[in-house]
Image (cartoon, grey):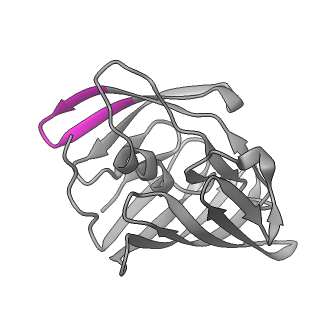
Amino acid sequence: MQLLDLPPLAAWQHTGVRTGYEVLFAQRATTGYRLRGVTTALEDGLAWSVGYRIDLDDAWHTERVEVLNSTIDGERRVSIRRHGERWSVNGVPQPALDGCADVDLESSSVTNTLPVHRLRFDRGQPVSAPAAFVWANDLRVEREEQLYTLTRTENDEIGFHYDSPTFDFQCELTFDRAGLILTYPGIAVRDR
């Protein structure tokens, strides 16, 4: 499955569990990519905004993540680093995240592109992609187990069955040929 380069701009309308909007600015870095974006949303009566910067190496492994959220309670920041197979959050080692290659932001549809670009898939075969999961409202970071199963490649779309045993959540994700979400049922729909 050959993916195209990311476009410099993409946007999603959040639907279902929250109302809101996400904008992504993607740029090629000296090595890998830099993804910058912001999501604003209203969810369960709470409003929040999450801005992020994700630095990736050439193999699409997460190297560095900076996240800032704003809520009625104020602002919070978290800095996440991957050092080989080890992770740290705000400079503190996090052994529970060891072995993860990706970050998954609760606030974002973008982070699902990371394993899609990084891993190799055979149709119908689940592939494990554990991630450092960052909660939108308080920026807590915890390990999330994920499975991606390639289900289809047709026209300009790629389909995956997505399973997060950590959150007892499953759905069918549709990506474009650049590996960005087109539809994430109950979460977001690509707007641009």
- Asked if 117 appears above or below 165 in the picture, the reply is below
**Is 126 placed left or right of 83 in the picture?**
left
Residue 23 pos. (x, y %) = 45, 69
- Residue name at image x 70 percent, y 58 percent: 87
Give the quarter of the image for residue 140. Answer: bottom right
- Asked if 187 appears above or below 134 in the picture, the reply is above
Outermost bottom residue: 30
- Asked if 163 appears above or below 75 in the picture, the reply is above
Quadrant the C terminus occupies: bottom left
**Is 189 placed left or right of 104 in the picture?**
left
Give the quarter of the image for residue 4. Answer: bottom left
Q: Main secondary structure of the magenta part?
A: strand
Front-most of residues 101 and 72: 101
Front-most of residues 173 and 132: 132
Give the quarter of the image for residue 139. Answer: bottom right
- Residue name at image x 79 percent, y 71 percent: 90
Outermost front residue: 84
- Asked if 1 appears above or below 6 in the picture, the reply is above
- Residue name at image x 63 percent, y 62 percent: 82
- Residue name at image x 72 percent, y 43 percent: 143
Q: Is 159 a magenta residue?
A: yes
Quadrant the N terminus occupies: top left
Q: Which residues are magenta?
A: 151-160
**Is 74 placed left or right of 37 in the picture?**
right
Outermost right residue: 73
Q: Is 100 a magenta residue?
A: no
Residue 126 pos. (x, y %) = 44, 23
Residue 14 pos. (x, y %) = 51, 53
